[in-house]
Amino acid sequence: MPIRRVNRENMNYYISKTQEFFQSYCVKKDLGILNITLSELINDVYDHSKSPIDSLVFSQFYPHSNEIKIAVSDLGNGIPRTANSYFNNKGWNQVSQEKALKWALKLNNTTESLPHNAGRGLDTICSFVSANNGIWILMSNQIRMEGLQTQNNFSQNPIEYFIGTVIEITIKVINLEDQEIIDTIDWDF
């Protein structure tokens, strides 16, 4: 799937088309959690980033390594800056960009009180990637995080003066659950 500008109005269409695209390569694999992850990433752009443009999304299947890669980016405030702004509004002390990102990754921590996810978005993504032995890379402001199955590694963002957030997820297709086959022949209606 080529890079696309995705907004809330066309998000479900994009996710549906992405699933169709991946399903043609990932026969008999359940892509449901991948769809939830993509939805969480796109929603985070609108719930938190204050990006002046829509999210930019890139999805690709790599047949030689049997991997799916998804990248979602925005040109918003960035996670550390957004978290520190939230801390400031609460009268709390500012923290380093690494500590702000670690705070944002914790379950139920949110800068917005929205009923549809309430601080579960990044944790959902982290759990999915970890459960599937995947890797995710998050770059936001001047911090870079590589999320592995057992730990998150933090370093300086190699892109100087980066504005916004980019999250890239890599999943091995073999680690996705198989689709459940439901036999409807014997059902009484």
Image (cartoon, rainbow, N blue to C red):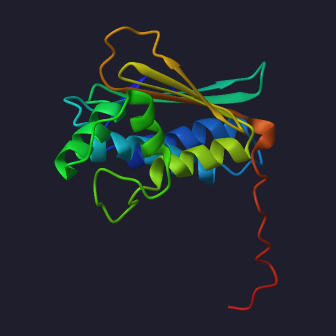
Is 153 rendered above or below residue 142? below
The answer to whether residue 38 is left or right of residue 47 is right
User: From what the image shows, is residue 144 above or below residue 171?
Assistant: above
Q: Nearer the viewer, residue 181 or 81?
A: 81
135 sits to left or right of 4:
right
Judged from this view, the residue extending furthest toward the front is: 93
Horizontal arrangement in the rendering, residue 114 relative to residue 179 (left or right)? left
Residue 16 in view in this figure: no
Q: Quadrant of the C terminus?
A: bottom right
Residue situated in front as seen by the camera: 163 or 185: 163
Residue 161: give x, y in percent of width and height.
31, 11
105 on left or right of 68:
left
> Which is nearer the eye, 23 or 42?
42
| Total numbered labels placed on residues in the image | 0
Q: Where residue 78 appears, x then y in whole percent?
A: 32, 30
Residue under the image location 35 percent in, 22 percent down: 141
Residue 187 percent coordinates (x, y):
76, 86
The residue lying at 49 percent from left, 43 percent from top is 38
Horizontal and vertical percent for residue 106?
49, 50
Q: Residue at position x 50%, y 40% from top?
A: 17
Residue drawn at x 38%, y 60% as measured from the top left: 118
